[in-house]
Amino acid sequence: MVRVYYEDTDSGGVVYYANYLKFMERARTEWLRARGFEQDRLRSEHGLLFAVAHVSVDYLRPARFNDQLLVGVNMRRCGRASLELVQKIWRDNEELICQGEVRAACIDAETLRPKAIPKTLLTELQREH
């Protein structure tokens, strides 16, 4: 759940469009965490990062100050070095207000070049798919 604060809104009192991407990013971090994978440990132990390579977002309804938002993550595809995810944001668990598709590339933390997803993570993610 995400609570909308004043700092999340624009001059019209509506959540600024780029902040939906921040809400989605936090949800992806929590999604990995719920599967036992912390991003800082993936970097320190496997030398990898996930970087957004593509995002497409549809803004359906405005979110406003003090709204409670639920941000979902569903994996569409898990490749050898990338994830394709569908994310949806609901207000009060019932009204769909935003949806997006995200492709996150697994990259080497030092070279920033593509890197295979570690077998332990790949196995866990593929089990879910």
Image (cartoon, rainbow, N blue to C red):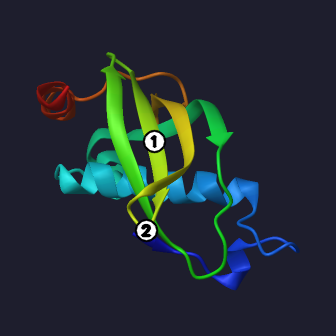
Q: CA distance from mark 1 to mark 2?
A: 16 Å
Q: Which is more toward the observer, 7 or 124?
A: 7
Please identify the residue farthest to the top as the structure is shown.
80
Looking at the image, which residue is at 75% across and 68% down?
14
Mark 1 or 2: in front is 2
Residue 2 horizontal/vertical position (percent): 46, 71
Residue 129 horizontal/vertical position (percent): 20, 25
- Of labels 1 and 2, earlier in sequence is 1
Side (left or right) of 41 relative to 102:
left
Residue 70 horizontal/vertical position (percent): 41, 61
Amino acid carrying mark 2 in the image:
Asp
Q: Which is more toward the observer, 87 or 79?
A: 87
Q: Which is more toward the observer, 8 or 70?
A: 70
Q: Say which residue label 2 marks.
A: 92
Residue 124 horizontal/vertical position (percent): 14, 34
Looking at the image, which residue is at 86% across and 72% down?
12
Side (left or right) of 41 relative to 15:
left
Q: Say which residue label 1 marks.
A: 87
SS of the residue under disc 1: strand
**Residue 25 showing in the rendered view:** no
Residue 7's disc is: none
The quarter holding residue 7 reads: bottom right
